Image (tube, grey):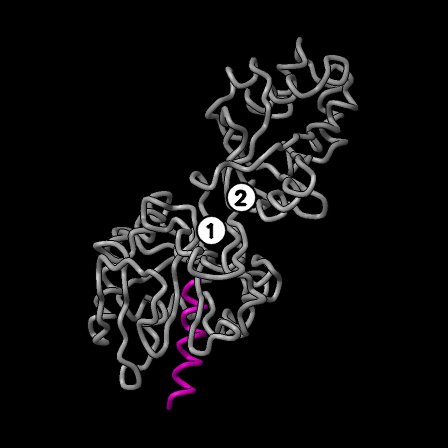
Amino acid sequence: MAVASFLNERLFNVTIYERNKALGRKFLVAGKGGFNLTHGESLSLMKSRYHPRGFMDRSLEGFSNEDFRNWLTELGIPTFVGTSNRVFPIKGIKPINVLQKIINHLTEKKVNIVYDYQWKGEQIADIVIYALGGASWAITGSDGSWADNFSDTLPFKASNCAFKINWPKPFIEVAEGKPLKNIVQRYKENYAKGEVVITNYGLEGGAIYQLSYYLVRDIYRFGKVEIHVDLKKDTPEEVLLSKLSNSREKTLTNALKRDCNLSRQAIALLKNILTKNDFLELPTLAYNIKHLPLTLHQPAPISEAISTTGGINLEMLNENFELKGSPDHYCIGEMSDWNAPTGGYLLQACFSMGHHLATNLNARHL
């Protein structure tokens, strides 16, 4: 849809071949969790969210988050930047409304749409643009089955997903379904701020998704990884130690709750991860409030992931996403091996890649 939106209709007769009975099913599913279209941060910071580094630079420079917002406004979809710096359509505009505006735009450009089309590897046009998706949303048709029609594809792996932690049973009985808010999670030199939710499986949520590229990579290398959680990111360790040492509360649990303002689930986490001696030793306790170690054993199954890596090896594509050795065959979107966190980055990437390719094709065929 992005490429077709930006191709010059006077130069190309454009047809979209859609596997389903309607366009944009994954677009609608993505809107169920809060429909953020892109992110409001600076372009330089946005570039750093994508892996491999530099892969998205030219596409983002040609169609930035501001360009995306301006284009949406032209379609009749005004947006605003929320408190999280994510960009949303204004109140009252639902995902289906945004999708319909884009489809109307395609209709105005006389784009043909063929539904219920199952591609089996055949040549269908002079210029073929594949946008076949990753493997994480089979319900929408995005199941990765197309990979059999390409050589040298990389295995699909979960990304933006939950991670397995072998929680102590007493802890999960108290904390399952509860959030850890306003935390920082660190893995090596990488960190993410935000919130996670404790589940029977492990941890899920934005703050863990942001690290998923590194976590999945190293779990496949080493079998498990250790992250460190700062449960009180705005309070220095020495301040916590002073509060605990000078508390007038009768129990250490009450001191953590009332003097340090830790949630019930955060306190339960400390009790179940630390030994009794470490929990009662105030300097050690204060340190672990800021650096609590958690071992992650595996990512969630692909079927439960928000996105995937793998698919088309980027080494098989040139700078305009053309398959090397196959002129006028292009691969864009989530079907190739790149990664970005949730928060608007995935959708922004797809539109930036589509704009980049369309601009290149328009220039070549003038």
Distance from the alpha carbon under mark 2 to that under mark 1: 10 Å
Q: Is residue 150 left or right of residue 78?
A: right
User: Of discs 2 and 1, which sits in the foreground?
Assistant: 2
Q: Which residue is mark 1?
A: 343
Q: Sort mark 2 into few (<14), some (14-19) or many (20+) by Cα contacts within 10 Å.
A: many
Disc 1 marks a residue whose amino acid type is Gly
- Which corner quadrant holds the C terminus? bottom left
Q: Is residue 348 visible?
A: no
Residue 353 lies, in percent from the top left, at 45, 68
Q: Is residue 88 left or right of residue 320?
A: left
Report the span colored magenta.
Answer: 350-366
Residue drawn at 56 percent across, 69 percent down: 57
Is 96 rendered above or below residue 165? below
Q: Which sits in the foreground, 136 or 279?
A: 136
Disc 2 marks a residue whose amino acid type is Tyr
Look at the image and say whether residue 363 sits in the magenta stretch: yes
Residue 187 lies, in percent from the top left, at 68, 42
Look at the image and say whether residue 222 sits in the magenta stretch: no
Q: Which residue is mark 2?
A: 209
Residue 243 lies, in percent from the top left, at 71, 24
Q: Which sits in the foreground, 320 or 151?
A: 151
